[in-house]
Image (cartoon, coloured by chain):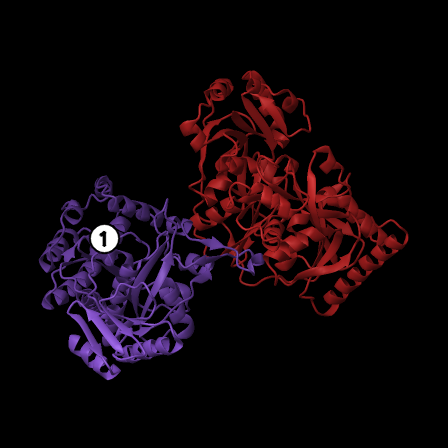
Chain colours: A red, B purple
Amino acid sequence: MIRIALPTGELRAETAALLERAGVGIGGYAGGSRALRFEALGGTGVARVFREKDIPVQVAMGNYDVGICGLAWVEELAQRFPAHGVARLAELGFGASGLWLAAGGDSCAPSVRIASEYANIADALARKMRLRRYRIFPVWGAAEAYPPEDADVALVDAVDEDAVCAHGLRPLARVLATSAWLIANRGSMASKDLSPLLSRLLGSAPAAAHSSTLAVPEALPLRVRETAARRNVIRLALPDGHQLPHAVAALDAAGLALDGYSGDALVRRPRIDCPGIEVKVIRPQDMPQQVAVGNFDLAVTGRDRLFDHKVQFPSSPVEEAADLGRAPYGLAAIVKDVPADSIAEALAYWRRDDGARTVRLASELPNIADHFARERHLGRYSVIPIAGASEGFVPEDADILIEGMETGSSVRANKLTVLERFFESTNCLIASTQRPGGRLGETMDAFIAKMRAGAREAVAAGGGA
Amino acid sequence: MRDVLPEEMERLRFIEDAFRRTCTRWGYREVRTPVIEPLHLFTAAGTLSPRTLDGVYSFLDWDGWSGERVVLRPDSTIPAARLYAESLGGTRTAKLYYTQNVFRFAADDAPREQWQCGVELIGDTGRGGDVELVLMALDTLREVGLKQLNVRLSHAGIVRAILAAAGLSAAEQSLAYDRLLDGDLGVVDEVEARLPQLNATLRLLFEVDGAGSGYLANVGAALTPAIPALREPLEELAFVVGALEACGVAPVIQTVLTRSFEYYSGLVMKIDAGGRRAAIGGRYDGLVGLIGQRDVPASGFALYLDQLIEVVEAPSLLAPVVAVEPEEQTPECVALAFDAADRMRRAGLRVDTTAGAVMQRRLRCRTTSPRYTLRSAAGKRTFEAIEDVMRALGSAR
């Protein structure tokens, strides 16, 4: 059985076309089916759909023999784990892009702040450029929104210089030419006959020969700022993505209007009709850290994200300031095809033949998954951080999924079993515990009060959830 | 990763004890630095190559929301320089020593943790400081019984002067140095091609291991007219070699000696014992200034315990062993046995009071006469009083 990891997202259509040309077409995958697992190679193979970021990890772990994903994610794994088990087989001739170092201005803090989805590559670049002191902000997305206020440099994915400039950034250097690559698990390559797939795929991919190694600039062309600029506004982070409509509703209930913050018209720096407050839109996952480091004073995110952050950094100076009561959902431990109604029964089932078997937990909230495993005394366990398409991980690639659930319809549709629902989340306003003094502090307090009042009124009117 | 077994621990402690005694005799004082340090201490020092930094164990601390990482210390000299700059005023001469572990990634099952006995001499000690460190390392190694010690010396300024004269940038110098260290003498020809003013071949430096002052004089005569910047490092090296020769040490001169091109600024030493790397050290005058507020000359060396325990034979330092057992399992008899064992331990004997130990002598105690029976290779003897047992054990020792 040949196991293939295929990408969802931007590379999906061209990957499906390549598979079609190679004569290994997977109907459901090409047709955009929402299913995550397909039969392949006439029953001698199985294909599983992942977020691109997860593919090198799954191939390195040996859960899949072969994968297709962007080179940047392979490099991201390689920079942190050079001894990983991924072999780069061939560039596939589509999905061409690049990783760029880009700045928002011409200066940087003495400890250079670098924001990126590719935190390991950013860290490696900082070491190789011999930055004397630096900080990495690993973000889930929107790294281009960080400079100049919240980072000195962003490492971003962009097709060319113009695309970098379109974000309002100054391109400093292209550090990696990326595109879709065919990768394989080294162990599978060494011992398993993958030729039925490889010969067809490699025969159908156009010859391409871009460099697949990092091009490290000799230095960052940025002047070091001696003193940090003093802020004279309160900075508020608002979420994009599925949290956006809930944040809009909460702000609306508080009587606050924004220009450039809606599903139809979204800009990274919307304007709010609240003097003394400056707004930026970033991913909700990144907000607790951004408030903790002092880039923002306030942020609207999910309580689960705050919990995940505080589990990792218990003394982090960020706290919940107001429960906004919207976007309710629970975090649950979810399994599939396990004859158990509790964690204890599931453990007994998994370890019925091997008492030392490792229990694998997959989650987009790896710190909470780790906390859950410790609290429930799972014994020997491993946490697999994942980027999405989570319901397809159990039971093949993980034993337990630590996952958010709303009504349970997705759980039922995927024939999953909830063993325990252990945390309830809604959206909330989080704040720095280091409240500024004077006028800024008053502005911050007044904003929190408005948001609390809006949430109370919405609950009273029955519209909170 | 590996465990250290009891026999290895005995050798390890033997070396550490000898090192500590030597350091005390030479007027050095012990320090210890934290296992966990901020990553920026090592990046700011700028003396660890990116390749070395790639292999450090870095992670987010409990306050890692700041985005800054911490590391398991990959090196002991940089923390010692920090300690000097932060806590010892950073002005007067400091003579410090430590026994610490350092952590660096190694492939497969190779140990990620290495133990070192390190010495740092920080302050303006002049060329005499370099001589002191070589002699002190030799003193320690002789103290643990090692006799065949090969001392090799170099000076970081020699290669630097040549590569700079050839117009190589700092990064190119580092790369060229690594090639030299890997035995790629092609780089010598490439450098020579950039130095038309040379009237002698550079291979003189890289193909010949010099035997002492005479060799250095030859090198100076051949190369300093074309590369004047060689004069200072050669003179410094000649001073140390001359002093060591006068002390009865015959060092070998080797132009390329150790990795860490960017670490050292002056004399570099390496001592091998029994085919193993026993000690490496040298001068790092720029380091304290990179970490603290002002430049302070400094030098040091480290003994590699993991290597030394393979070649050092620790004498049996442990006292003879006695097993003491009650003849009858009654409270009175057990108490008598523990009382006898206590008397022996206070007299410096190693005594085992639990069953099953393999011991040289075995004393059985009982509440009726005769109270004590002592068995050994010499036979069986009985005693009424513990004082008689102690006398018998004393004469046996």
Residue B279 % position (x, y): 24, 60
Please report the residue visible at 73 percent of the width from the left and 48 percent of the height from the top.
A330
Taking the image as shown, residue A409 lies to the left or right of residue B60, namely right
Quadrant occupied by the C terminus of chain B: bottom left
Q: Is residue A27 above or below residue A59?
A: above
Q: Which residue corresponds to mark 1?
A: B257
Q: Is residue A100 left or right of residue B130?
A: right
Q: Is residue A289 above or below residue B246?
A: above
Side (left or right) of B221 relative to B115: left
Residue closest to the far right: A461
Number of residues whose C-alpha sits closer than 10 Å to that of mark 1, classed few (under 14), some (14–19) or many (20 or more): some
Secondary structure at numbered mark 1 = loop
Determine the residue positioned at 31% across, 63% down: B356
Q: Residue at x 78, y 59 (%)?
A: A275
Disc 1: which chain? B
Considering only vertical position in the picture, is A323 above or below A162?
below
**In front: A253, or A222?**
A253
Q: Nearer the viewer, residue B141 or B156?
A: B141
The image position of residue B117, as x and y in percent, is: 29, 64
